[in-house]
Amino acid sequence: NFEIPTPHVLEIEQSIIGALLLEKDAILDINQILKPESFYSEKHRYIYEAILELSSNLEAVDIITVKTELKKKKLLEVIGGGAYLSSLQSMVSNTANLEYHAKIVAQKYIQRQLISVGNEIIKISPLNWIPVTGGICPGVKCPEGREKKCSLCPYFITGSYFIDGVIFRANNA
């Protein structure tokens, strides 16, 4: 057993949020790349959700409106208060690399999801291996060239319900 480090880059997450607080139209550049759960940090998720909500309601997105939205949702103190928002904004000198940074955060999110799926498979796969004898092959081309339904298959498979379940759990984690 070994622990896989959780893929994330907090500095880039901070830079993205700071850029969104500085540049009123910056959300339009990344709202198709990132979703709230893409952020590793829970407080960055909350801030991003507030920014998305303001933007979708065609309201201004800046430090004051985001702070007000978070306060309304009773999340301002959870994220570290107005001082944290100010610190994020002050970290950014320009928004030129915003889309590139968003793609990095999205990639880290996908990596975390893959690790989650892998961990699920590791946890439950020993319990779900089924010998196929006289039953239905996995629905893929048999390595020995036989038909999909055979009584001679020596291979062990997992049912498609197992894989579907793992993917469902990973997507809804």
Image (cartoon, rainbow, N blue to C red):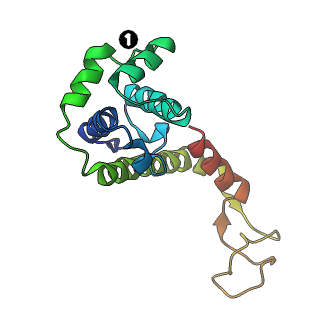
Q: For the image shown, how many numbered marks are present on the structure?
A: 1
Task: Please state which of residues 114 and 126 is positioned toward the viewer in this rendering.
Answer: 114
Task: Please state which of residues 137 and 105 is positioned toward the viewer in this rendering.
Answer: 105
Residue farthest to the bottom, as pictured: 145
Q: Quadrant of the C terminus?
A: top right
Residue 41 % position (x, y): 37, 31
Residue drawn where x is 56% and y is 32% of the image: 57
Residue drawn where x is 25% and y is 51% of the image: 97
User: In the figure, is residue 135 to the left or right of 36?
Assistant: right
User: In the figure, is residue 166 to the left or right of 146?
Assistant: left
The residue beneath circle 1 is: 77
Looking at the image, residue 164 lies above or below residue 24:
below
Residue 65 % position (x, y): 41, 22
Instruction: Let me know if residue 159 appears in the view.
Output: no
Q: Quadrant of the N terminus?
A: top left
Q: Residues within 10 Å of mark 1 (few under 14, many from 20)?
A: few
